[in-house]
Amino acid sequence: MDYENGSTVTEFILVGFSGDWQLQTFFFVTFSLIYVATVVGNILIIVTVAANSTLHSPMYFLLGNLSFLDMCISTVTTPKMIRDLLAEHRSISLWGCMVQMFFMHFFGGAEMTLLIVMAFDRFVAICKPLHYRIIMSHRLLNTFVILSWTIGFIHTMSQMVLTVNLPFCGHNIINNIFCDLPLVIKLACIETNTLELFVIADSGLLSFICFILLLVSYTVILVTVKHKSPGRLSKALSTLSAHIIVVTLFFGPCIFIYAWPFSNFASNKTFAVFYTVITPLLNPIIYTLRNQEMQKAMRKLWTQQVSFMSNL
C-alpha cells in the first residue's frame, strides 16, 4: 500500500554513533567489553544467590530477579548496537523494530515494579524487623515477581497495540542507537498527537511518579529509624544507599527520555547508552561492592569451583 509521502517503509535506518573508523572501533571494543561484563556480572549474582544458602532471603531473591531483568534489557539492544558499529548499512526491519520496542518496555516496566517491591522489602526489614520473615513470605515474594512481569506486559502492550499498526512511509531514519517509541511514532504518516500524549502519560509520567514515590519511601524509612532507633541510622543509610543509587540510575534516563519524549532528549544517544548499556553493568557492581555478605558468598563459590576443578 502506497502513501502520499512515498512507498511503505519496511525497514528503519539507525543513525547510531558518528565518527571515523578508529572511533567506531573504539566504541565497538568498549561496548563489547561492557556487555560481556554485564552478562557475566549479572549471571554471577544470580548463580551466587541460587547456590548459597545464606543468601536465600527475600532481599537476595529480589536482587537475583533484578539482575536477570538488567541482563535482558541490555541484551535487547546492545548486541545489535555493537554489530552496527562496524556495519556500513545500519538498518533494522519494521517488525524487528517493533519486537525491540516491545521487549524494551516489557523488561523496563517489570524492573520499574520490581524496584518498588525492593523498596517495600527494605521498609519491612528496617521498620518491622521482628515480623520481616512473616510478612515477606515465599508466597508474597512469588506474587510480587509475577505482578512485576504482568505489569511489564500490560505496560508494553498498552503502547504497542497502538503503535504496531501505524503506517510508515517516506522518512525512515531513526536518530538513535535502537528503536524507541517516541522516535518511531514521529515517523508515522498520520497525525500522532494523541498517541504522543499517551506515551508521555504511560512511560514518562509513570516513571516520574514512581521515582518520587520511591524517594519519599526511602525518606520515610530513614525518618522512622531516626526517631525509633537512632543507633541504627548509619546501618539503614548504608543499606538504602545502594538502592537509592540504583533507583536514580534507572529512573533518571527514563524520565529525561519519556517525560519529554518528543524533544531532543528522546534522541540523545548518551541517555540511551546510559539506560541500556551502563546501568545494567553498574547495578551488579553497586550491590556487590557495597555488600560484604555477597562478596563473601562469591569468594566461597569461587573457592568451591577451584576445588572442584582441581579434583578433576
Image (spheres, rainbow, N blue to C red):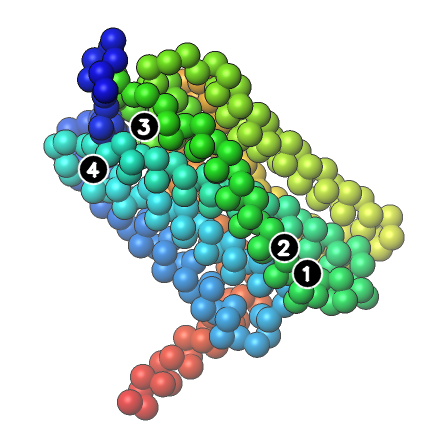
Q: Which residue is mark 2?
A: 144
The residue carrying mark 3 is 176
Query: Element at badge 1?
Result: helix
Task: Using a 10 Å C-alpha cutoff, classify the residue at mark 2 as few (fewer than 14 neighbours), some (14 to 19) or many (20 or more).
Answer: some
Q: Is residue 291 left or right of residue 221?
A: left
Front one among 122 and 259: 259
Question: Label 2 near label 1: C-beta < 8 Å?
Answer: yes
Residue 93 place in picture, x, y as percent: 24, 34
User: Whole-percent x and y of residue 240?
Assistant: 66, 50
The CA distance from mark 3 to mark 2 is 34 Å
State which mark lies toward you, 2 or 4. Answer: 2
SS for dot 3: loop
Amino acid under disc 3: Asn
How far apart, in angstroms, are the residues tagged by discs 3 and 4? 12 Å
In the rendered structure, the answer to whether residue 60 lies left or right of residue 11 reads right
Question: What residue sits right under mark 1 in the picture?
Answer: 140
User: Could you tell me if the residues under marks 3 and 2 are in contact, i.e. CB atoms within 8 Å?
Assistant: no
Dot 4 lies on which element?
Answer: helix
Q: What residue would you read off at disc 4?
A: 84
